[in-house]
Image: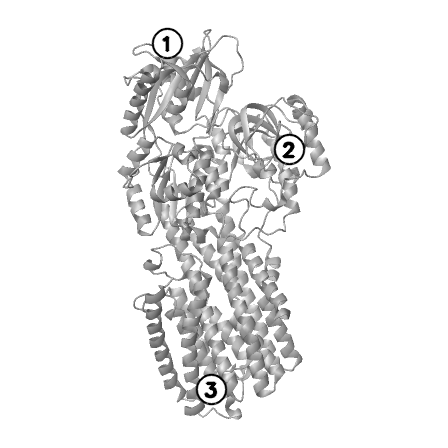
Amino acid sequence: MAAAASPLKRLRHGFSRLLRRRGRARHFARHPLQDRFAHVGRAEPASPAVTETLLAIAADEPAAALARLKSHPEGLTRREAAARLARHGPNEVEHDRPPGPLRHFAHCARDPFNLLLGGMALIAALTGDRAGALVIGLMVILSTSLRFVQEGRSSRAAEALRALVGNRVTVLRRDAGDDRADAAQSAGNHAAADPGRIVPRRSLEIALQRVVPGDVVSLSAGDMIPADCRVLTARDLFVAQAAITGESAPVEKFADRRDATAQLFEQSNLLFMGTNVVSGTATALVVATGGRTQVGAIAARVAQAETAAGAFQTGVDGVSWLLLRFAAVMVPLVFLLNGWARGQWFEAFLFALSVAVGLTPEMLPMIVTTTLARGAVALARRRVVVKRLDAIHTLGSIDTLCTDKTGTLTQDRLALGRHVDAYGSRCDEVLSLAFLNSHFQTGLRNLLDRAVLARVELPVELQLERDWRLIDEIPFDFERRRMSVVVAERDRSPLLICKGAVEEVLERCASVRAAGASGAAGATDALDAALRARVLAVARELNGEGLRVVAVATREMPAGQGVFSVADERDLVLAGYIAFLDPPKDSAAPALRALAAHGVRVKVLTGDSPAVAEHVCREVGIPVERVLLGAELEAMDDAGLAAAVQGHTVFAKLAPLQKARIVRALQAGGNVVGFLGDGINDAPALRAADVGISVDTAVDIAKESADIVLLDKSLAVLDDGVVTGRTTVANLNKYIRMAASSNFGNVLSVLVASAFLPFLPMLPLHLLVQNLLYDFSQTALPFDRVDPDLTARPLRWNPASLGRFMLCFGPVSSVFDLAAFAVLWFALGASAVEQQSLFQSGWFVVGLLTQVLVVHMLRSPHLPFVGSRPSPALLATTLTVAAVGLWLPMGPLAPWLRLQPLPPAFWPWLAGLLLGYALLASAVKAVYQRRYGWQ
């Protein structure tokens, strides 16, 4: 067996490599870089020339950096950008691409099984068996062509789906025009579809691939860094560089700070492709794109490295390895038994090779690719885009879905409900302050901001353009959960206006605007413990009505201060609250019921207040006994959290890393977890989940971290996706089970026949033709119907159950093979060596028709054609194969195949054998299902 280990290992490796290639999996799916280059360790700089250029630009003043790249503070013109795109090429790093037609066909032909068949054809030709060589050659051509066509279609479908979801970059163009319509048109109307992204004047949103050196890009929280860049301006800019450097904490970046002694990745004014903005805003000069970036250099060094196998690929590999181990034991037995019984060792060798081909599911790569691609196309019709094909399997396996609240359970269309002072009385001044904050901020505007800005009368009332000006801004981040702007009205002292989560803003407050007071110099009440409890009670009362509450506070700043920071958010005066209504979706409750019916628990993970979360959940039918808060979660150890997450449904006031920790705790409890999110704070949980799900309007880092992107943020669509994933897995299971059990039964029959017959029960050529026809009958399985009860619960790969299934159903076909032997030997008189052609022809037909019958008997736990109907495509392929099997011994190809016409007495026996097989298989199926279940 030691000698056999090497080819078996190569064969298994061929399976794994093929499946990973066909999946074209990662393309920076879960994280733009981290998964793909995890084994590289801490990144090393690219070529010396590229590194020197970056270091030189890091040492330049911003103006000198612009001059070096022949750019301008307001960016390139459109003509300049087009010329540079033609010169430098698209901004893409090296990744798996579909091969050209010739290369793809050659790859299909180099399959290990085709090489085995080709070797057999060569041996047949050298030994004078031209007919056998021709037939085997036709098998290779047909198998290769079928796989080439199917995989080509699947690959094109997968690439087209991935192209539907792409990141956009805001670039400055000197000739972009001053009207938003021009910008939206040039951006492919993407800006209109994503109102949360601010598109400044003279800026356009373009596809990431169209970014060129010299472009000036505008960045804000949630954006991916599109290329290697030099910071030109920055405001509290923090960047996550973990994918490049391994640093767990975000790194602050500056425009004017240069360090001649720092290493490349330690330069505080350089940004690198593949990292992302955590908080703050910036403009940056693009220095290098595509393969000339640091990421591009890494990608080129590891382009040939294979990604780590996921759960799906591991499952497929496990199935393949199980069958190969079985073949490694059975094939030598067939060879030795036939060689010893008849003394024809060369003939026994060819027969054993044919058995080996029959035992190996050579169509598995094609079936896997076609099934997954069909699932992806089916999901695309439901406006679900699959970025990584094997994520379809995982989507079908999830039993727990973690989701945020806004836009999933609610309508994602916030309306301003109340604006009150800290004591609960209506206060228009609070709304005016909130409007100034939302209007002057330059970061990512959220739904709350848009709801405030919808009050179109306020700019006129405030005389906004004439009287107010922005002095500075302190951007939002998810640690502080607040943001501030510093504005001035005419020549008055600057006013800091802070807006954010109630508890976080109150922490920075020293007093509260007195009831009825107005203006920055109005009367205030000191914020002691009693008053804190009183104003918090007002916020909780609003939360209890299902309103999301945001606190607004102010601080009058000294004149002359030009730069402000987080440290200035202190001694604030609480002005009051603005509260928003986000009604539940009408589709949420039915979708939740559908997910529950399919065995998927939904858990709500939100950063919102517990009262709002509980109110919304109760309205959509999610049972809530108690909301677990982020602060409570933080105090738990892993064991305590693992128990808590199983018993709680709603989690509120969560930080980003707490969401990811909940996901990991659920996984530790044996759950397969999906996570649906669209914000910067969701990225850690998206990467931690078994399948990350985002939406097309999400921030860049969320879309890049996700495996699946919804074009509509809806749980109903996601339920369709779960069912489609389970349908895909069920059809893959069908192929594996049918192939394994049928081939196992054939080998058992061959072993028995080899021990007692004076001749081979079937020629190698017969086995190969039979195997090819049987495989063809199964090519429509990816398009087969799946019974609803099979998609009612999560489906997972279970290689261990395959062995049990094979050992149970394989002998059923062997029983009727042996019965066919008896009929041919005793009833039809094919007992002499001179009658071996009759025997072999009869068993060829019986074996093929029982295999075709296996397809219908084992495709469903129900009664075939009555309790479960096959798809028209599967019915057509199986009937075609059955007709061809009946025709071959009777037609003109019979002499070439060494078959002969069967006598009339054979056909009644054949009908009886097939009927008996169907009845016995049904009985065994019923017993198996009662004891083990079908899946």
* In this view, 169 is above or below 542: below
Q: Which mark, by number, is residue 901? A: 3
Q: Amino acid at mark 3?
A: Pro
Report the Cα–Cα distance between label 1 and label 2.
48 Å
Q: In the picture provided, is 586 more to the left or to the right than 360?
A: left
Q: CA distance from mark 2 to mark 3?
A: 77 Å
Q: Secondary structure at mark 3?
A: loop
Q: Position of residue 202 (x, y in %)?
A: 53, 25
Q: Nearer the viewer, residue 175 or 411?
A: 411
Q: Is residue 466 left or right of residue 214?
A: left
- Residue 623 showing in the rendered view: yes
Q: Are marks 1 and 3 in contact (CB under 8 Å)?
A: no
Closer mark to the observer between disc 1 and disc 3: 1
**Mark 2 / mark 3, whichever is N-terminal:** 2
Q: Residue at x 41, y 80 (%)?
A: 815
List x then y, in percent, for residue 110.
Answer: 61, 64
Mark closest to the chain's N terminus, 1 or 2: 2
- Going by the numbered disc 1, the residue's amino acid type is Gly
For label 3, count other residues whose C-alpha is less than 10 Å away and answer few (under 14), some (14-19) or many (20+): some
Q: Nearer the viewer, mark 2 or mark 3?
A: 2
| Residue to which mark 1 is pinned | 519
Picture residue at 52% right of the left edge, 60% below the top: 317
Residue 651 in the image, given as x and y percentages of width and height: 36, 37
Residue under label 2, please give it.
265
Q: Secondary structure at mark 1?
A: loop
The residue that appears at 32% across and 19% down in the rendered structure is: 535
Image height of 156 relative to 284, above or below: below
Q: Neighbour class for label 2 at 10 Å: few (<14), some, many (≥20)?
A: some
Q: Where's the N terminus, which quadrant?
A: bottom right
Q: Residue 609 versus residue 357: which sits nearer the camera?
A: 609
